[in-house]
Image (cartoon, rainbow, N blue to C red):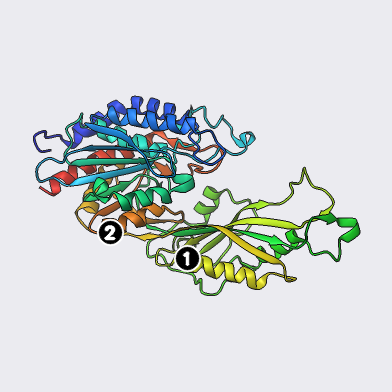
Amino acid sequence: MRGNVVTPDEIEGAVAAGLPQAVEDLKRLVAIPSVAFPGHPEEPVRAAAAATEELLRSTGLPHVRQIPVEGSFPAVYAEAPAPPGAPTVLLYAHYDVQPAGDPALWRTPAFEPTEIDGAIHGRGAADDKSGVISHVAALRAFQGRFPVGIKVIIEGQEEYAGERLETFVEQNPELLRADAIIVADCGNPSVGDPAVTTSLRGMGAFTVEVRTLKESLHSGSFGGAAPDALAALIRMLSALHDDHGDIRVPGLPRGSFLGSGPSEEEFRATAGVLDGVSLVGSGSLADRLWASYAITVTGLDVPTVSGAINAVQAVARARVTVRVPPAGDPKTTVDAVVDFLRQVAPWGVEVHVTDYVLGSGYLADSGGAARAALNRAMERAFGRPPRDVGAGGSIPLVSTLVKQFPAASILLFGAEDDDASIHAPNERVNVEELRRTALAEALFLQEYGSATV
């Protein structure tokens, strides 16, 4: 390090020594229910922003502050100037979390972080408060004397409205400009299996509403002739896939992923697929998960079973999410799906589509000095070099970073793993995986600074 030479052994020792504090910091952060969705209290989200600000100050970064993001919760920003001739690295994560969902499905309370068998359980423990803490733990290893310039941006509403930070990036490019960018919002296929995510699917989402009647009607008096909006919507949604689970919408072909994916046995175990239930779609699992389109119905507005009444429904709604291959265009894809739903709508029903959300995918260049430095760092931290993997999920911010900073190397890795149950009950992060991820990041900062002298 310029003016402060630190060996890999010293970095490894510093990260290990700081791990107990990092675990306590993670527990404190997970205990804050920072759900930035409408209808949830805002105070915990702001409390998480304050806690994140405090954590970044503890790393020795000289400039830390909250910055407003229009229409969203504040982001937490920090920076340290680069030593002469050194590159600058931007670190990204988010402090907001998904809603906990049904408490009955959690084995431990969602916002009471619990350590069991070397893992921290709680909403956000992996996605993405582990990303916040991996940055903090890596930076603490340098005691304020960093080998590269550091910029940190921790977002406050990624799970609900991440496109608002995208606008902020477009309006404030110099604030975030960097030579390399670490996005700590993903992870490895399994614990101890190092990977760099080089492919992200884009996404589109919309709400489709079907109307058939002025108001719902008694099913005994009118059923059999009155058009049921729910039945119409079910027919429309089921038409999106054929009997094998492949998409029937024209213009959405299956793609191909060049790297290796999970085996069917690994995938079934990770996904918890029940015995006797088949997987859907065709082609390799890597193709299906990382390089092809996928359509999922993520919500329905219909009467609940417990609240059911004997009525023909006048209106029914569904939220539909489409995952788009990196080279695909989200708007064109969503337009194709919406046009198809209108074409297959039965009985002349009214179809209304609202609440569009779009986000582009990403395909990385796996070369360059930054990736080479990360490969060396991850090999030391994990005992073997990383492999390239794709992600079926979307991080729309990444495509914005690519457009704004085309010369920057964007590196996606983190402490999550496929068994971490992100966005689901019983989310957890493995503590050893958190240590290895923080170590890999710290070693990368040292390697990258040295490699670019």
- The percent coordinates of residue 292 (x first, y second) are 47, 65
- The percent coordinates of residue 56 (x first, y second) are 30, 31
The residue under label 2 is: 366
For marks 1 and 2, the one nearer the N-term is: 1
The alpha-carbon separation of the residues under discs 1 and 2 comes to 27 Å
Question: Residue shown at 79%/56% (left/top)?
Answer: 215
How packed mark 2 is, by other alpha carbons closer than 10 Å (few <14, some 14-19, many 20 or more), is some
Q: Which mark is residue 331?
A: 1
Judge depth for marks 1 and 2 and give the one in front.
1
Using the image as rendered, state which of residue 107 and residue 53 is in the foreground: 53
- The percent coordinates of residue 366 (x first, y second) are 28, 59
Q: Quadrant of the N terminus?
A: top left
State which quadrant residue 230 falls in: bottom right
State which quadrant residue 414 falls in: top left
Three-letter code, disc 1? Lys
- The percent coordinates of residue 281 (x first, y second) are 56, 65
Question: Residue shown at 48%/39% (left/top)?
Answer: 97
How packed mark 1 is, by other alpha carbons closer than 10 Å (few <14, some 14-19, many 20 or more), is some
State which quadrant residue 402 falls in: bottom left
Using the image as rendered, state which of residue 365 and residue 402 is in the foreground: 402
